[in-house]
Image (spheres, rainbow, N blue to C red):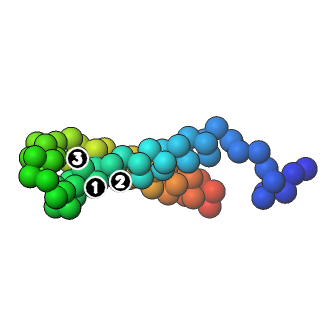
Amino acid sequence: MPSPANRPASPADKADKELLFKGVTCALIGLVVLIAPCVARSPSVQDIMVQSALVGWFALVLGGGFLVRHAMRRAAAKARGRS
């Protein structure tokens, strides 16, 4: 019998990790796109980045949604484990 530390990853564990990775990645992309106009030196680059603010907000909200879903899954798994 494998110990809990050496048990093979279940599909649910892999899905949770993938959801966390997607959430962090999307949120970081959104933050970078939203912060980029503040640090850009060229006015033309600032204009381009300002026009992409909608994409940045979308990525940030999508990443937040993935992170919330991940947290909900973990809470449900903990609740199932205690019962």
Mark 2 Cα-neighbour bin, 10 Å: few <14, some 14–19, many ≥20: some
Q: Find residue 56 and name its label.
A: 3
At label 2, the amino acid type is: Leu
At label 1, the amino acid type is: Leu
Q: Find residue 31 and name its label.
A: 1
State the CA–CA distance, disc 2 to disc 1.
Answer: 5 Å
Left or right for 50, reference 71: left
Residue 22: where, in percent of width, then height? 44, 44
Mark 1 Cα-neighbour bin, 10 Å: few <14, some 14–19, many ≥20: some
29 vs 38: above or below: above
Residue 25: where, in percent of width, then height? 41, 48
Q: Residue furthest right?
A: 1
Tag 2–tag 1 contact (CB < 8 Å): yes
At label 3, the amino acid type is: Gly
Q: Quadrant of the C terminus?
A: bottom right
Q: Is residue 20 in sight in this rendering?
A: yes
Residue drawn at 22 percent across, 46 percent down: 56
Left or right for 16, reference 56: right
Residue 46: where, in percent of width, then height? 12, 51
Q: Is residue 61 in sight in this rendering?
A: no
Tag 1–tag 3 contact (CB < 8 Å): yes
Element on which disc 3 rests: helix
State the CA–CA distance, disc 1 to disc 3.
Answer: 7 Å
Residue drawn at 9 percent across, 52 percent down: 43
Residue drawn at 56 percent across, 52 percent down: 77
Mark 3 Cα-neighbour bin, 10 Å: few <14, some 14–19, many ≥20: many
Element on which disc 2 rests: helix
Q: Which of the pair 72/30 is nearer the observer?
A: 30
State the CA–CA distance, disc 2 to disc 3.
Answer: 9 Å
Element on which disc 1 rests: helix
Q: Find residue 40 and name its label.
A: none
